[in-house]
Image (tube, rainbow, N blue to C red):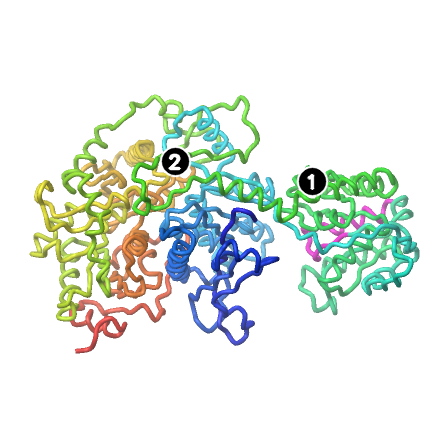
């Protein structure tokens, strides 16, 4: 498309003996038409490419349900590719400045999870398409009754899939769906999306009224594109009155035609065509009943059922075999022999010919499914000039609105189906009008039309590339929260939004005592807490302007020069235990670090002030470390050799990281919600005293901290995450320090994402990073272990924190690969020699 320079499709590289060799190719260019001419004007790196990223087991195919532990490895490798390509494009067409992606689009839940992490690491807008949503699949499987909830989760890892879709909602600017039914019936099942709340928030934005940190992604209906250039339509009818050049020989009929026609005693009659697998949801039995019980329809038309391929009914799955047998019994019951075709075999390449045959007989295509999420076959049929009859439930409503080429029916109403079919095959003027409408409007489902709609939505996203990458420091840093125009125009909407403390989407129940409208009247500007936080930050870093200048000027950090970086991220029961581990790791590096090629980063839930006090108490200098990831990843600091104007504290804050993680941060609106939540927890457990209360001394601009006096009495982390999502507050909720602290930080912030930020910002090689972690830890623990970096697990450390993970939606084993060659475990009560031995096994240090 004009204006698109390059598209990279990132997927998994598979080098397995039982998989086609092309899946092992690291890259593949998708050639354009007239590629040679286009390349002259666009450059050598333009075009579209499939980029295959190696991750997970190297020599075998892994089904998607088992890929979750390996997703961080994909993210890290994809991040490296994107940065490299950005530099190459910058050198070719960007005047030497890296060219960042315009958007990152995740397809399906696992790719949505990966896209959210990539979007956060690069500060690039994210787009998401769900494809078979997990909550809808879970409901359907439970209704079938063949598997229990636990069995479904074991088989499909469905809860991890659902959480990935929730995370995608948290991070996405735009969610693209094929139909409105997907929005109103499927996405509304998620904690992070509510159509009513979305409309209210958008109405407030249009009025220029604050949403107080609440955000819903834009839901946009863009139907998939269809390729039409290969379609050959027939003019004429079944008698062979097709326009041909008199001198040209008649082309033979496709074999599938005779395969179908031999079923019919009168093949000249219009053909009613149904193309669907033998699945009860497709409702084929109701169609056969409608046809069999309507004598006028039987006299006027034939029925063709294309129901997949079969050799022997006894070899089919139980459900499919039972359905096919019931259809055969109905054919016998209504004596439909000579009027119904049901061929055993067809090839995919036969499908266009089947559509053409139905159109040639002036027939009708029908999709009577109980619910049809989209309805691709309806568009295909219209492209061949076939009028349609379709279910009124789901995607066909949107398709019919555009094409206006047939009739919608209630799939449960057998008479309605018969009447609609009879009307179309008996009224030739109506049939012709529907045919022409379909052909006239079908271009709206073409690839060019799809791309135009897609690109118009992408262009509406505010670009938020890293601030440190910009040459103009005066760029407007404000961002639009507009959910766009994905919904119909809003008229007379009540804006009095009541939010339930219990996180209930339904009306009624207790409320947070403040609607959005009453919050609107809150005092603007910095409140007491924000002023205290600002003072803390200024006292810690010695003035924001100087810190920004020093970091941005390239004087920091020393990370650029390190060959290896050791990230100490063990979540210990006490700070003294953490200090001991720090000393052991530094000692383990020993003489290998005499040349300074090993850097150290501390990654912790502690504040920078707590960390400073800890280092001083242990006789360690902050200058011995390269970076400090504090407050569960919401703050990033570097050491400073000068304490002038820093009140004696040798740290500089990375303001670019703070700006980087500002995206969707709820600020004061979020804090007020959390304070009310804490009060409600304390009220319910009144006899126990205060269970949780705000900790202003440990809170910062991007981390709201709470003290937990009784971890057993507060809800598990998954419930608080759910509450925040239901109220459209996008954030990360983390229980830390063995459940005695609660941190709420920006959705783009985390300890693992701070590490990726250091990779993007300073160019550290993630494959040369070693993360030293405990056997368990804070509720963000899983993010520390996955990726291309190496991991040393200190057994026994953080083990008591397992209770924090007991009420997870999914188990840690579903998302962590402990048998990776990059992971090594050190026995309990280890010393520096044991840690060193582990580092030698990983190939980081040389044996002594």
Query: Would you say 89 lies left or right of 220 here?
Result: left
Residue at numbered disc 2:
479
**Crowd around label 2: few <14 · some 14–19 · many ≥20 (10 Å):** few
Looking at the image, which residue is at 37% across and 22% down? Answer: 518
Judged from this view, the residue extending furthest toward the bottom is 848
Assign a secondary structure to mark 1.
loop
Residue 797 appears in the rendering: no
Toward which corner of the image does residue 391 lie, by quadrant? Answer: top right
Query: Would you say 58 lies left or right of 301 here?
Result: left
Please check the rendered image and state whether residue 284 is part of the magenta-colored stretch, yes or no. yes
Is the C terminus in the top left, top right, bottom left or bottom right quadrant?
bottom left
Looking at the image, which residue is at 88% across and 51% down? Answer: 237
- Residue 284 in the image: x percent, y percent? 74, 51
Please check the rendered image and state whether residue 209 is part of the magenta-colored stretch, yes or no. no
Toward which corner of the image does residue 336 lie, by quadrant? Answer: bottom right
Q: Nearer the viewer, residue 635 or 655?
A: 655
Give residue 392's mark.
1
Query: Would you say 843 lies left or right of 388 here?
Result: left
**Crowd around label 1: few <14 · some 14–19 · many ≥20 (10 Å):** many
Query: Total of numbered circles in the picture?
Result: 2
- Name above or below for residue 497 compared with residue 362: above
The residue range painted magenta reads 274-294
Q: Nearer the viewer, residue 774 or 253?
A: 253
Toward which corner of the image does residue 258 lie, by quadrant? Answer: bottom right
Sequence-wise first label, 2 or 1: 1
- Name above or below for residue 7 compared with residue 174: below
Mark nearest the camera among 2 and 1 is: 2
Residue 776 appears in the rendering: yes
- Name above or below for residue 205 compared with residue 562: above
Q: Nearer the viewer, residue 810 or 794?
A: 794
- Residue 798 in the image: x percent, y percent? 24, 58
Question: Are dots 2 and 1 in contact, CB under 8 Å?
Answer: no
């Amino acid at each position: 498309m004009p204006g698109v320079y390059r598209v990279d499709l990132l997927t998994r590289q598979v080098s397995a003996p039982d998989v086609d060799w092309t899946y092992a190719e690291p890259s593949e260019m998708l050639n354009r038409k007239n590629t040679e001419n286009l390349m002259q004007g666009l450059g050598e790196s333009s075009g579209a490419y499939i980029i295959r990223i190696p991750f997970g087991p190297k020599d075998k195919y892994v089904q998607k349900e088992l890929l979750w532990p390996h997703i961080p490895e994909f993210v890290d490798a994809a991040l490296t590719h994107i940065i490299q390509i950005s530099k190459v494009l910058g050198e070719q067409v960007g005047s030497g400045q890296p060219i960042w992606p315009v958007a990152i689009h995740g397809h399906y839940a696992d790719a949505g999870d990966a896209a959210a992490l990539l979007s956060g690491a690069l500060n690039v807008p994210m787009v998401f398409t769900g494809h078979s949503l997990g909550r809808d699949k879970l409901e359907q499987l439970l209704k079938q009754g063949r598997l229990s909830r636990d069995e479904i989760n074991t088989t499909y890892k469905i809860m991890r899939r659902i959480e990935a879709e929730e995370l995608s909602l948290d991070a996405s600017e735009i969610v693209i769906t094929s139909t409105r039914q997907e929005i109103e019936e499927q996405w509304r099942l998620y904690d992070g999306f509510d159509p009513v709340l979305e409309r209210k928030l958008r109405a407030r934005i249009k009025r220029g009224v604050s949403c107080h940190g609440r955000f819903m992604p834009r839901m946009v209906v863009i139907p998939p594109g269809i390729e039409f250039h290969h379609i050959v339509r027939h003019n004429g009818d079944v008698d062979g009155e097709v326009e041909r050049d008199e001198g040209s020989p008649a082309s033979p009929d496709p074999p599938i035609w005779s395969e179908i026609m031999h079923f019919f005693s009168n093949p000249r009659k219009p053909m009613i065509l149904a193309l669907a697998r033998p699945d009860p949801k497709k409702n084929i039995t109701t169609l056969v009943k409608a046809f069999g019980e309507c004598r006028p329809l039987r006299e006027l038309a034939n029925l063709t059922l294309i129901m997949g391929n079969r050799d022997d009914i006894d070899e089919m799955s139980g459900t499919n075999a039972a359905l096919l047998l019931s259809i055969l019994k109905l054919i016998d019951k209504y004596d439909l022999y000579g009027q119904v075709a049901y061929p055993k075999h067809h090839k995919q390449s036969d499908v266009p010919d089947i559509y053409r045959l139905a159109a040639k007989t002036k027939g009708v295509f029908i999709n009577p499914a109980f619910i049809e999420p989209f309805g691709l076959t309806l568009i295909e049929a219209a492209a061949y000039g076939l009028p349609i009859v379709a279910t009124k439930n789901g995607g066909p409503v949107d398709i019919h609105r555009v094409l206006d080429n047939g009739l919608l029916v209630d799939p449960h109403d057998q008479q309605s189906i018969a009447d609609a079919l009879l009307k179309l095959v008996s009224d030739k003027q109506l049939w012709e009008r529907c045919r022409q409408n379909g052909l006239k409007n079908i271009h709206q489902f073409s690839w060019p039309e799809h791309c135009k709609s897609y690109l118009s939505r992408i262009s509406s996203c505010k670009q938020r590339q890293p601030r440190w990458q910009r040459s103009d420091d005066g760029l407007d840093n404000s961002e639009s929260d507009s959910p766009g125009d994905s919904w119909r125009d809003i008229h007379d909407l009540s804006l009095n939004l009541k939010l339930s403390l219990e996180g209930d989407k339904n009306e009624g129940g207790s409320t947070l005592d403040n609607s959005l409208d009453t919050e609107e009247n809150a005092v603007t500007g910095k409140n007491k807490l924000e002023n205290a936080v600002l003072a803390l930050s200024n006292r810690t870093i010695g003035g924001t302007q100087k810190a920004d200048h020093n970091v941005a000027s390239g004087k920091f950090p020393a990370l650029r020069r390190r060959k290896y970086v050791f990230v100490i991220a063990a979540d210990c029961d006490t700070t003294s235990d953490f200090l001991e581990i720090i000393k052991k790791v530094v000692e383990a590096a020993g003489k290998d670090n005499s040349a300074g090629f090993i850097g150290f980063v501390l990654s912790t839930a502690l504040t920078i002030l707590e960390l400073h006090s800890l280092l001083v108490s242990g006789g360690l200098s902050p200058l011995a470390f390269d970076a400090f990831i504090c407050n569960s990843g919401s703050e990033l600091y570097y050491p400073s050799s000068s304490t002038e104007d820093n009140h004696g504290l040798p740290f500089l804050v990375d303001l670019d990281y703070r700006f980087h993680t500002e995206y969707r941060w709820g600020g004061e609106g979020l804090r007020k919600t959390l304070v009310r939540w804490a009060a409600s927890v304390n009220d319910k457990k009144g006899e126990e005293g205060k269970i949780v209360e705000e900790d202003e001394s440990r809170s910062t601009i991007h981390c709201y901290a709470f003290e937990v006096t009784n971890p057993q009495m507060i809800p598990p982390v998954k419930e608080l995450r759910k509450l925040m999502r239901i109220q459209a507050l996008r954030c990360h909720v983390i229980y830390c320090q063995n459940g005695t602290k609660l941190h709420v930080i920006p959705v783009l912030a985390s300890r693992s994402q701070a590490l990726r930020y250091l990779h993007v910002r300073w160019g550290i090689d993630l494959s040369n990073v070693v993360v030293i972690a405990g056997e368990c830890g804070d509720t963000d623990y899983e993010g520390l272990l996955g990726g291309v970096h190496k991991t040393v697990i200190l057994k026994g450390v953080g083990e008591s924190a397992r209770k924090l993970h007991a009420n997870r939606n999914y188990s840690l084993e579903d998302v962590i690969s402990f048998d990776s060659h990059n992971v090594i475990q050190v026995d309990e009560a280890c010393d520096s020699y044991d840690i060193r031995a582990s580092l030698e096994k990983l190939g980081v240090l040389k044996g002594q």
